[in-house]
Amino acid sequence: MVSILDIIGPVMVGPSSSHTAGACRLGLIARDLVAGTPESALIELHGSFARTGEGHGTDKAIVGGLFGFRPDDERLRDSLQILEKEGLDWRFEKTTLGDEPEVHPNTVRITVKRQHRHHVMLGASLGAGRIKVSQIDGYPVEVDGSHHTIVMVAEDVKGSIARIAGILSDAGVNIATLRLSRKHRGGDAFMVIEVDEQPGEEVRDALRALPWVRWTHRIDKVGG
Amino acid sequence: MYGSLHDAIRDAEARGVSLATAALALEARDQGRPVAEIREALARALAVMRHAVEQGLTGDLRSNSGLVGGDAAKLRTGPAGPLAGTLFRDVLMRALAVQEVNAAMGVIVAAPTAGGAGVLPAVILGIARDKGLGDEVLIDALATAGLIGAVVAQRASLSGAEGGCQAETGAAAGMAAGAATQMLGGTPSMVGHAVALAQQGTLGLVCDPLGGLVELPCVFRNATGAAIALAAVEMAMAGITFAIPADEVIDTMGEIGREMDVRYRETAGGGLAATPTGRKLSRERLVQIRRS
């Protein structure tokens, strides 16, 4: 859903809402996947990101996002110098991930590692600072960063939604939207749950403890 | 948010309210937040817009590449042209100012995007100053601009990479024209005509930044985008109507954007970016950025 405040905003460091602010938000989400500053990162730029990213500060913005800087943080300007000083193993590559319309021209694949965590996400910057993460660890997701979001792959068992809703409700977390899909009856169910309150670690742990949950992630709101 | 200006205008006129009131009520419902909270967020955006204008007019800003900067100040203090001292020149100056701040990685409000961020503040702040209009009127103007931008986002695109510059400074011109028409007392349907009049004048506009930098021609396209917005406001306020409804003009922009060759969509592969001078300047400037 597009809102007035998506359009009149974000307040951001220039020069490009798609190549700078959107790129920063994608970096923030990748950071979230490993719950902190990645020890190593591979940032693969596709399309317009690859061709014009340098001039738009896309590299600075993604790096800034990975450091946890938000789109209006003036440190984005200096993020590459900060990276050099920190001496982390973060690399950029230009790549081709497919054709339009399947792959948006402003797409990036980010592979991040920190301690035992290792994740890959595919995301695009849609314009006006809006983003869409379309894949995490190979699973199709649709995360736009406008809400705190829980993504989950679970076995298709009866009552699973009720259990999940119960855990969230016990933690005082209200569900804003819920999308559920599965390939076939009894196959893996894929869930994207957008929530109003930020779910704590205990929620993630409770969800991970469910025997039929194969994979789950909590992604914090990054804008909107 | 409304998916068409037609629905928004019909709703506002049926209830006898402004488009801003109708849009804010819907936004409040969509977001589950009180209208006052949304107005506060818009007031913060307004403050950032004002600050960016001031910074651009007084600061000595240079972009990373050194390709743009200092031109807003020329309009402020430079030799008088035929339009010196007019609202028109004042608006052009503000549009350049915000984009110069943007190119220098300063803080701006993307409205709707960073590349088109100069048009809306230039037009509404210029008109507010000229006519002595206060912040509440400006916040209403931002709400209506947000509505117009949301309709464009849903029906077409707000990304230069998807739709060319018509989707950035073009959409901004439509937003600014509609917002300013409302500020000046235009009815919701006059706002619709202002949007159509502005956006018809930017159809087909390509996104061809030198070296892919949001600098040249972007800074100047914000000034010309603001000029188109003023032209549309003047016509709409005189009661001129545009026969093709704004929604259909917006749909046309989307259609043209989808058909536009990739060279003209922010890739620096065509247009001014691919001219002999454009190529030469981009090479030189990108080398300079890498060194900086």
Image (cartoon, coloured by chain):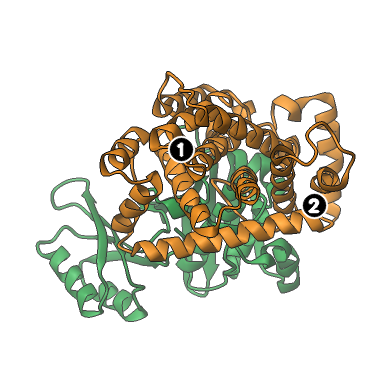
Chain colours: A green, B orange
- Three-letter amino acid code at disc 2? Asn
Q: Nearer the viewer, residue A158 or B152?
A: B152
Q: In the displayed structure, does residue B266 sit left or right of residue B96? A: left
Q: Position of residue B98 (x, y in %)?
A: 69, 50
* Location of residue B123 with respect to A21 vertically, above or below: above
Q: Position of residue B119 (x, y in %)?
A: 62, 42
Query: Which residue does the numbered mark 1 point to in the structure image?
Result: B186
Residue B250 visible at all? yes
Name the residue rendered at 10%, 65% in the picture: A159
Query: Which residue does the numbered mark 2 point to in the structure image?
Result: B64
- Three-letter amino acid code at disc 1? Gly
How much space separates mark 1 and mark 2, taking CA atoms? 41 Å
Which label sits on residue A176?
none
Q: What chain does mark 2 sit on?
A: B
Secondary structure, mark 2, is loop
* Location of residue A67 with respect to B4 vertically, above or below: below
Q: Position of residue B195 (x, y in %)?
A: 49, 32
Name the residue furthest right.
Answer: B79
Q: Are marks 1 and 2 on the same chain?
A: yes
